[in-house]
Amino acid sequence: MRSPRDSHRPSDWLLRRANPSLRAAGAAVLAACLSVGASADATPPASSCPPPEAVLGFRPGDDGRLADWSVVRTYLEALASASRRVRLESVGPTTEGRPFLIVTITSEGNQRQLERIRQDNLRLADPRHLAAGEAERLVEGGRVVLAMTYGVHSTEVGGTLSALRFAHLLATTAEPALVRSLENAVVVLVPSLNPDGNDRVAAWARRQKGTPFEGTEPPELCHRYAGHDINRDGYAFLLDETRLLVRHLHDRWRPQVVHDVHQMGAFGPRMFLPPYLEPWEPNVDPALRDAGAALGSSVADGMTRRGFAGIVTSALFDAWSPARAFVHTHGGVRILSETASARLALPRDVGFEELRAGPGVDPRTRAINFPLLWPGGRWRIGDVVEYQVEASRSLLETVAARRRDWLQRFLEVNRRAGSSRKPYAFLIPTPPRDGLALVELERVLLTGGVELWRATEAFAAEGRSFGRGTIVVLMQQPWSAFARTILERQTYPGMADGAPLPSPSPYDVTAHTLPLLLGLDVVTVKEPFTSRLEPVTEASVTPGRARALGRYLAFGHDGAGLVTVARLLREGVEVRWALEESVFRGHRFPTGTFFVAGERGRAILTAAGVELGVDSEGVPALPRSVGLVRPRVGLYHSHVPSTDEGWMRYAFDRQAELSYLPLLDAEVRSGGLRSKFDVLVLPDQGPDDLLRGHEIGRLPPEFTGGLGLAGVSALRTFVEEGGWLVSVGRSSRFVLERFGLPIDDVAFGTERSANPVFGPGCILSGRLDTSHPLAHGLPRNVAVWYDRGPVFASRQGRTVLRYSGPNPLLSGGLLGGAQIASRGGLVEVPFGSGRLLLFGFRPAYRGQARGTLPLLLNALYLSAASAPTGPTGSISAGD
């Protein structure tokens, strides 16, 4: 059996340019390559193109070696300058301001006509306007577009190293098969989808080098907001990196195939390739399902024949969630490869007997989908790189050899989508309760390439009347599959009350109905209707206006209103929050309406009217209300990274403009919290991770230990002294246990019972007690994101939200719906002089749950509210 990891000697090019100073070497290499590239009329010989080690100072795959993003960029600049096959672009800044890079690699001849190739491919993407015979001509003369994306999860360190090796191979190869492939294909390569995380991991690895903690992962999220969820943003497009990828890869190129390069655990197979497990997202065209399965199987077969052991197909991963597979609803195929990991960049010894089974595979047993066993042994980062480069190479050769077939399939899939009438359209009635939520949905659909229309007059459809301004999404368009995927409600196969737990469990979440999470109504229309429409080309708010003058200005308690509150408080303007309904000059102002006075308040509201669509109304007096000041918010920051914490940071920073401070274990344990904070937030996290954190000795001491008993005591004291503690999802189980609350968790421990409660990421119907201030600004019925959190049967406090009956499931999959109907999803409990607010669901889920985010924001603002004006009383009716 061939070992895929060979020994390599440094090239003559590297030996000639060796330099003890890496920075000086990089500068010298780049200058030399700029000179070569400027004077050459053809692609320079391979000896003129720098290998990665010339700039990095090590060969990608060498044990213990990682590269900073600035060095990666320097190398790619050098390679692009030296090779006429390679074009490098920096297309915009990442979340933390690093350059997001895209490398286009193809033959010299294709590079000279690259814009024509790109435009022809875009015309195939939307064949509705092609003249007779034109499509066939484009297929015959086109080039297949293959995207290669690496490094989205930055602790999977092989990806970016593999991208550099693969780029150098394509830039320098004289092998006939690869040269032909580059004539038939355009490779659009993204060396890292997460440059910020690349530098986090590289910096951590440097700090731990030579210590007992070398090879450990950083005790923080490897993306500021999304952490490991960075590739779960493929239909909401909230992250800077996702938007750059869609705009500069998918929109510009519409690839037929995307190779999404990942790593997985160390104790299973050595690599996964499609076919995927069932279920698939039902809106993916069957031709794409079949093509992806055939392509993955072909690559796996070729690698197995060449001696790459431990490759599995039809196992481990399903294709249900669109969050990781944008291309599946845009005419192309996603080939996921998952390679076994080392210890970051250090070797890992894995005995054959340590290999563990997973869905569809036992890596110690030969099977039809797992023909060549890996015998165990030492697994290095170099092995990861070799497997990934070989998979990328094999994929390119296979796709390019069937160039015409891929273009023809692309054309046919897009033709079918453009003639779709199932359903005929989706309608989004206006005005919505929250204008920013509608803007968000419009932005998502437009970013996904969906054509939107707005009704210019009232019309009727399927026996209902719809007003002027209704948003219309017709299905006769190329990306109708994307629109259906996020607008429809999902039914996850095999999950209904009385059914056993699904085996295997869903790999990711089961629901992705975005309008529900945004709190918007969407109507499905099956039959054609007549209406006057105008195109919507940009998501924008309808500007608000001040309707009258008065001592105070009143404005609504919605998403835009809460952003305005944050801006007003930041500028020192007092905001009053109404605790009762009022009527002035015939206008009704519901409970929860905000009021401000003064010229600064008017100026900020006027600006918010233009930017956010806030309407304000002048009134002469205030109803019974409380005064707001900027709450002092502490957001718990665990050294066992919580993805939910990252998404809360996103919600606070970018959706609510709310100030907060991160709160570490040591600060909690030291006590004295009430003098610093009004409210503390525990994001969704397992109780054991909260209490114990990392085991002592696993990481440097400052990152171990969790909250501990001292932290629990400090939290209790904080609440007893008047602070508010907000717990989310599984962290509410921690509070139930550690605070000794007389509240039962209906869902806890039932997954092994005959009637389990099991909701692995679904959307449920909740019913709010709208008289409670936490629910101000929200309708009585809301959709909430539930993911295996507690469900409360409360004998103390007040239940603010209950799950609807007889089964609360709105979208996705849920077992035990009848058991949780009418049970609590949000409970407020007085404790000492303070409050405990227990969320069983995630109100800031992945930045998408705008419909429930106000519940969390209301809690934060109320924590610092003054006593009510008028008759004395508490904020909470639960006293």
Image (spheres, helix red, strand yellow):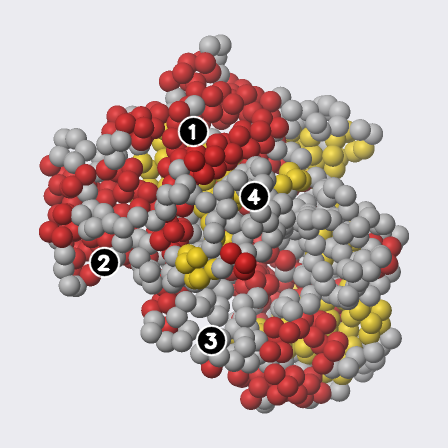
Asked whether residue 497 appears in the rendered view, the answer is yes
Kind of residue at badge 2: Gly
Q: Secondary structure at mark 1?
A: helix
- Percent from the top left, x then y, of residue 163? 35, 46
Nearer mark to the viewer, of 4 and 1: 4
182 or 620: nearer the eye? 182
Under tag 4, what secondary structure?
loop
**Residue at which label 1 appears:** 399
| Location of residue 54 with respect to 300 vertically, above or below | below
Where does label 2 land, which residue?
57
The residue carrying mark 3 is 699
Is residue 768 depicted above or below 497 in this figure? below
Check whether the beta carbons of the residues at disc 2 and disc 3 lie within 8 A of each other: no
For disc 4, the marked residue is: 366
Q: Residues within 10 Å of mark 3 (few under 14, many from 20)?
A: many
Q: Give the position of the N terminus as an image quadrant.
A: top left
Residue 547 in picture, x, y percent from top left: 66, 54
What residue is drawn where x is 40% and y is 46%?
A: 387
Rounded to the nearest whole Å, what is the CA distance between mark 2 and mark 3? 28 Å
